[in-house]
Image (cartoon, rainbow, N blue to C red):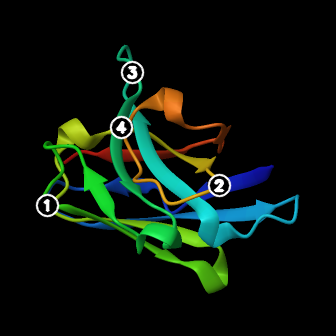
Amino acid sequence: QVQLVESGGGLVQPGESLRLSCEASTVTGLRFEHYAIGWFRQAPGKEREGVSCISSSLTNGATDSAESVKGRFTISRDDAKSTVYLQMNSLKPEDTAVYYCAARWKPGPALCGTSISEYDYWGQGTQVTVSS
């Protein structure tokens, strides 16, 4: 079991940047580096969608991202701090949403995905608003 806490959201203007953090606390003896972490977002009136993910260190932290954020968002992890980051550059008004991180554990190497159903543990979310 793992508990997740997001932070770093806020109000920015179009073209600006934000860095979101997802800090994990593992309740069981499973090590954080064995979890894949995904970032998702949900805008008002829309379904939650996958943004980006990073695989566990068993797969050398391979990443994947939605087409809408490729080239603008970068996901990374610091296993020593049990934290995953989402660096968001060139933000657009359509990026406005509540951003959630989620965790998934598998016993062996497995690439992450951006499907909601893959993840078992979720944070409470952090609001990102992009507006002039």
- Give the alpha-carbon distance from disc 1 to disc 4, as whole Å: 21 Å
Residue at point 16%, 61% (across, down): 72
Q: Residue furthest top?
A: 45
How crowded pointer 3 is (Cα within 10 Å; few <14, some 14-19, many 20+) is rated as few
- Give the alpha-carbon distance from disc 4 to disc 3, as whole Å: 15 Å
Who comes first in sequence, dot 4 or dot 2?
Answer: 4
Mark 3 against mark 2, which lies toward the viewer? Answer: 2
Mark 4 against mark 3, which lies toward the viewer? Answer: 4
Residue at point 34%, 65% (across, down): 62
* Residue 10 image point, x, y percent: 44, 55
Q: What residue is pinned by disc 4?
A: 50
Q: What residue is pinned by disc 2?
A: 107
- Give the alpha-carbon distance from disc 2 to disc 1, as whole Å: 40 Å
Q: What residue is pinned by disc 1?
A: 15
Amino acid type at image mark 3: Pro
Q: Quadrant of residue 13?
A: bottom left
Residue 44 circle label: 3
How crowded pointer 4 is (Cα within 10 Å; few <14, some 14-19, many 20+) is rated as many
